Image (spheres, rainbow, N blue to C red):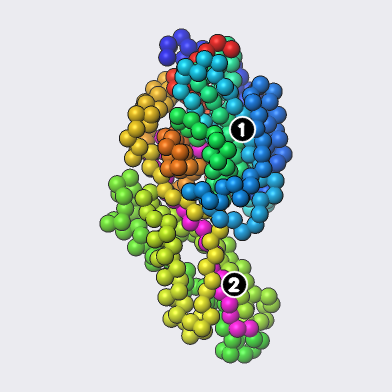
Amino acid sequence: MQDNLKERLCGAVDEGFDRQVAFLSALTAYPSTRGNEQSAQAFMADELDARGYELDCWQIDIAEIQHLPGFSPVLDQYEKAINVVGSHRSKTDQGRSLILNGHIDVVPAGPLDMWDSPPFEPRVENGWLYGRGGGDMKAGLASNLFALDALAACGLAPGGDIFFQSVVEEECTGNGALACLARGYKADAALIPEPFSEHLVTAQLGVIWFQVHLKGLPTHVAYAGQGANAIEAAFPIIRALHDMEQRWNAAENRPPEYGHMDHALNLNIGKIEGGDWTSSVPAWSVFDVRMAIFPGQSIDAAKTEIERVILDTARENAFLRNSLPEIVYHGFHAEGYALSRDSSVHAAEAIAALDSAHQTATGHALVREAITATTDARFFGLYADTPALVYGPRAEAIHGFNERVDLESMRRITKATAMFIGDWCGTEEL
């Protein structure tokens, strides 16, 4: 790419940056938690339509994707789980195609009194935008859109097809991105601006979600010795699962990407409930678990060990051995993915193009990083033979209180993305 075009694109990003921050504030104000994404998606669709993109909005149909690799099981049917894709079709078709992917869904805000300001009333202070989802990952959606705007402001369009995706379900299944693949949206590369501090993600973990259902024997608390406490029965099982977590993290089990990390795989007891009355020995409990796995680690083998650990521990309990726990899988059935293992020409060229764009935007070489989370990149890399580059702005307290995103970092990411699109796809006159 000519230096002159790089300068023009960066200048266009600067010229439109106040509008970009206003756009991000408006988008962050939508409380787009799972099942409540419709208004935010309507906003995205309107913005794409106003820019002249070919618009595709559809409700995800489980029947259309449940047979596909990468599908994650769900406990309830989807209601109004809407994906939005805006397509640019190149007139010349001389360049390479690109998916710009981001997710609109956000995690719950938690107790509102623990936020310094309301989570869905975004505020800008000292160069940061505060609000639930501002960092994870609506700033990324904004950088994708305004990078394309920068090209348009220069009188240019991408020289290859572009598919701008705003998907749901990233925080719990990834089935939104999978539905895009099932609908036929494929390209030569994908860019996902998740908030990992302007680093290129070279590897990500897989994730398994499951529930453990326990049954006890209720009685009045005065005769507790005659009952079986289904809440307390969870404790030894949780301890056994943490022992398993330690074994999986042992040095001999780590792949090269994670060899330097003592504890890359984290088990989390995310929710527990049970019992019906304070003075009754609880007859039931349910706890939800998230467990990570390494790239290349088999989901089926991991599930087999999880089940063995839970059932073996239950058989050591005098009551539970006659009332074994039920294990229910729902949500993430996500494999790990390592871009570093993609030896294709497309992967090497995409990484080189992003490295060059990043250096121009920031003045620094692109840092590579293996992360301990999962993203939708796995769908493109594992199931569509498409190198997936995860590269987004700096954010803090994602999934926590007072989530915030660094606006100058978003500016740099937007500039780098605009230059990457221009290099990867080429350009053509509007």
Element under disc 2: strand
Q: Residue at x 56, y 29 (%)?
A: 163
Place of residue 307 in the rendered image (x, y in percent of width and height, measured from the top left): 45, 68
Q: Is residue 72 above or below residue 161?
A: below
Instruction: Tell which tag, 1 or 2, sits nearer the viewer.
Output: 1
Q: Quadrant of residue 272?
A: bottom right
Mark 1 residue type: Val
Q: Mostly what secondary structure, the magenta segment?
A: strand
Q: Residue at x 58, y 38 (%)?
A: 183
First to last magenta residue range: 194-218
Residue 123 visible in the snapshot:
no
Q: Quadrant of residue 164?
A: top right
Looking at the image, residue 141 sits to the left or right of residue 312; the answer is: right
Mark 2 residue type: Ser
Element under disc 1: strand
Q: Which mark is residue 85?
A: 1
Task: Please state, as top left, top right, bottom left or bottom right, where the C terminus lies in the image.
Answer: top right
Q: Residue furthest left?
A: 252
Q: Which mark is residue 280?
A: none
Q: Earlier in the sequence, mark 1 or mark 2?
A: 1
Residue at the spot of label 2: 285
Q: How far apart are labels 1 and 2 at the CA level?
A: 41 Å
